[in-house]
Amino acid sequence: MRWMESSYPAKASLKLGDVMPLLSSATGLLFAAYLPRSKTRSMLERELSAARKSLAEIEPALASVSEHGAARVEGMLLPTIHAFCMPVFESTG
């Protein structure tokens, strides 16, 4: 994980180890796109139910994450925080 500090004041109380939502965080979207559905199904179903969305509605976003190899959100989880997340599958190359 790499955290880049902003040159502007930003209030975010996130720390390493926090569990992020699948549908409203860059980290969550990345995991939802790359992990086998069997690993994310229960959390995904809870979030879809709470958001009153269907899996069909979010599949294009997950496909885009897979296609581009990155996830990005702007102000979804915290209004002033934008996040970008990329997977590292092998640290040596």
Image: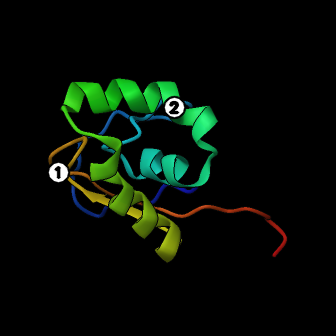
SS for tag 2?
Answer: helix
The answer to whether 35 appears left or right of 80 in the picture is right
Residue occupying the point 68% across, 62% down: 88
Q: Is residue 79 visible?
A: yes
Q: Which residue is mark 1?
A: 80
Q: Which residue is mark 2?
A: 41
65 or 74, which lies in front?
A: 65
Residue shown at the point (35%, 43%) measured from the top left: 55
Residue in the picture at 27% in, 51% down: 57
Corner quadrant of residue 90: bottom right
Question: Above or below — where is 74 with respect to 10?
Answer: below
Q: Secondary structure at mark 1?
A: loop
The quarter holding residue 13 reads top left
Q: What's the amino acid at mark 2?
A: Arg
Is 6 located above or below residue 78 in the figure? below
Instruction: Quote the CA–CA distance across marks 2 and 1.
Output: 29 Å
Q: Is residue 16 something that shows in the picture? A: no
